[in-house]
Amino acid sequence: MKTLPSAVLHVMDREADFYELLDFLTSHRHRFVVRLRFDRATDKGFISTEMNRAPVRCTRTAEISARPIAKQPGKAREHPTRAARVAQLEVRAMALSIQRPSHVSKQLAEHLAIHVVRVLEPNPPEGCEAVDWLLLTTEPIETDEDLSNVVEGYRARWVIEEYFKSLKTGCAFEKRQLENRAAVLNALALYAPIAWRLLLLRSQAREPQQRLASDVLTQLQLRILRNHQWS
């Protein structure tokens, strides 16, 4: 039976750039956008060399969020602080065939046909690290709209991370002392919509225009909050 491509788009940062995962996602026809960590070999050369030769396909702007001081010293070196800004970006794209690294299993595909999109900030502000994303993707890259969808797909990673932070911190999901997998999954089913609601409330609270509580909360939720005895 022929498998259909997944309707879900997997969005992952550089920690997901390993050949075994890329092979699995590709062979099972999963859609994905994964940021490149390693400068992989292709049938033409290395990815970085090929992307430097690729012409600029389109330009666009993107809001770059501020990055606070990291609490862990190692993270501070890897992710230095930055101020929020609007970055002017150039987008390049091409289809490449990634070669299987010598250290992975020979049972994996010898080559992976994949699209590579490079998002580069050619003139960053003085003292700021330039935006430079190399994205591996199964998404189409024929039109400017296609490229914009790939870039926006990767940029959604920040919202995804905030959602999991809401789940782990706001709902304290990792602190639940549950005894088996079924209990963990039941708790996740309960907390997932709560985490989404917390993220929605925070996002709406940061909007410049004032919103009514009824825009984001049901009448039942408002009634519970009004009757809650706050300490």
Image (spheres, rainbow, N blue to C red):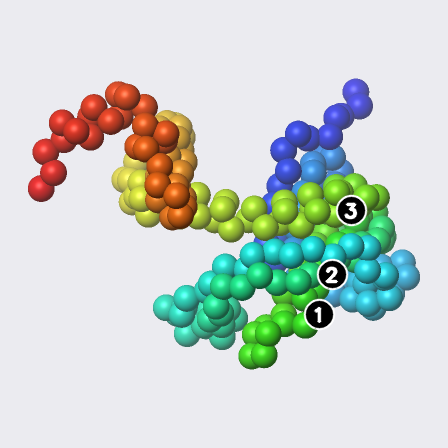
Q: Is residue 134 above or below residue 107?
A: below
Residue 215 vertical placement versus 202 (above, below): above
Q: Earlier in the sequence, mark 3 or mark 1?
A: 1
Left or right of residue 77: residue 56: right
Callout 3 amino acid: Asp
The first of marks 1 and 2 along the sequence is: 2
Query: Circles 3 and 1: CB distance less than 8 Å?
Result: no
Residue 9 occupies quadrant: top right
Q: CA distance from mark 3 to mark 2?
A: 12 Å
Residue occupied by mark 1: 122
Q: Are marks 1 and 2 in contact (CB under 8 Å)?
A: yes
Along the viewing direction, whichever of 223 and 5 lies nearer the viewer: 223
Give the crowd class for mark 1: few <14, some 14-19, many >=20 residues within 10 Å: few
Q: Nearer the viewer, residue 214 or 67?
A: 214
Say what secondary structure mark 1 lies in.
loop
Q: What is the C-alpha distance between the residues marked 1 and 2?
A: 7 Å
| Residue 84 visible in the shown view | yes
| Crowding near the residue tagged with mark 2, few <14, some 14–19, many ≥20 C-alpha atoms within 10 Å | some
Q: Secondary structure at mark 2?
A: strand
Q: Residue at x 66, y 62 (%)?
A: 88
Horizontal and vertical percent for residue 129?
A: 59, 73
Seen from this angle, which residue lies furthest bottom? 127
Write the residue at 80% across / 23% down: 2
Q: Position of residue 191 (x, y in %)?
A: 35, 33
Residue in view at x 44 percent, y 43 percent: 163
For label 3, the residue is: 144
Quarter where residue 76 is shown: bottom left
Name the disc covering residue 90, or none. 2
Task: Name the secondary structure under disc 3.
Answer: helix
- The three-letter amino acid code for the residue at tag 2 is Glu
Type of amino acid under label 1? Pro
**In the picture provided, is 69 more to the left or to the right than 43?**
left
